Amino acid sequence: MHPKPLPTSPKPLLATLRGEKQPIPPIWLMRQAGRYLPEYRALREEKGGFLALAMDSEAAAEITLQPIRRFGMDAAILFSDILVVPMALGQELWFETGEGPRLAPTVQAREVLDGLQAAPEALDPVYATVRRVAAQLPSSTTFLGFAGSPWTVATYMIAGQGSREQAEARRLAYRDPALMQALIDRIADCTIDYLLGQIDAGVEAVQLFDSWSGSLSPAQFEQWVIAPTARIAAALHARAPHVPVIGFPKGAGGKLPAYARETQVDAVGVDETVDPAWAHAALPENLPVQGNLDPLALIAGGATLDSAVDRILSAFAERPHVFNLGHGILPDTPIAHVEQLLARVRRQG
């Protein structure tokens, strides 16, 4: 774990990421600002589609703050999207209604990658959002920035859209590893600058989302997930040494310990498929861990939810722990169940 030679933070989540075990673990939820909240749906109805919201700094700041006002989460996470990095690299991004993101031109040949014209100004609205949120957050709330990890971002840039098995990206990695390396390097460079820009604007910790890392073989995982993540973490530690980096390699499973050791991230996010007792035993001692409630257990609520929460709290009781879901909150999640979760974690119910 990268050392953080700072005094105890008045922000419980930030202190946890720096290695301080809390008597009650801090909590935030991936996608906590979003479609399950009526105030989000109302703003989206008023402002338009997702990308319009994400690029409107006033609206994006309001959305970032909504779950803080409603639930008192211990962290606010920037409302944005991992695909702003491809925009900054020169791809066109749009969202098809009911189908998700689209990117063009698809990067499946070296001449396409070399033909992209960088547009770093595409990230300016995100930095404006960060400044707006930082000026309004409660003093005890940690502000999290984020970016997609290079492998996950590359899968979208190659296929032009999301895909469950990432077949086109995996084929390209085998067929033309030099092109894949060039693309991964370009994404990593942009991501370092992007996260440093978020830090300069006011975020206090950052998370790298590798949502599709689970589709890779062990050797590819080492090359396309661990190596670029280690590079990004090292650059951030060198230039922003007091800002913790959370790595979230969804689907990594048994590769989690190697990821934690070799990337040198400050905390590891664990998805819902991982046994928390195994994770506690297998991960480096005292490394902060984040996770890992199944989003569907949150939808179930009741005794099912309480039991799942208690199991996670027990498994991670002896190390710094940030309570979270194993992936993003689902749109049909009842607000009452989020309130039940918070009460259980905070020992109020």
Image (cartoon, grey):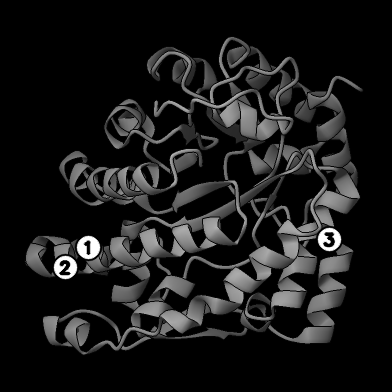
Q: Which mark identifies residue 185?
A: 1
Picture quadrant where residue 102 is located:
bottom left
Task: Tell me how far mark 2 sits from mark 3, CA to CA.
Answer: 40 Å
The C terminus sits in image quarter: top right
Picture quadrant where residue 152 is located:
bottom left
Residue type, mark 1 in image: Asp
Residue position for label 3? 37
Return the x and y of residue 289 as percentages of the image width and height: 53, 27
User: What's the residue at 39%, 76% (across, down)?
Assistant: 86
Task: Tell me how far mark 3 sits from mark 1, CA to CA.
Answer: 37 Å
Return the x and y of residue 284 as percentages of the image width and height: 39, 18
Residue type, mark 2 in image: Ala
The N terminus sits in image quarter: top left
Answer above or below: position of 286 versus 240. Answer: above
Residue type, mark 3 in image: Leu
Answer above or below: position of 21 versus 185. Answer: above
| Number of numbered discs | 3
Which type of secondary structure does the marked residue at label 2 adopt?
Answer: helix
Left or right? Give the position of 139 relative to 273: right
Residue position for label 2? 182
Picture quadrant where residue 124 is located:
bottom right
User: What's the residue at 39%, 85% (across, down)?
Assistant: 119
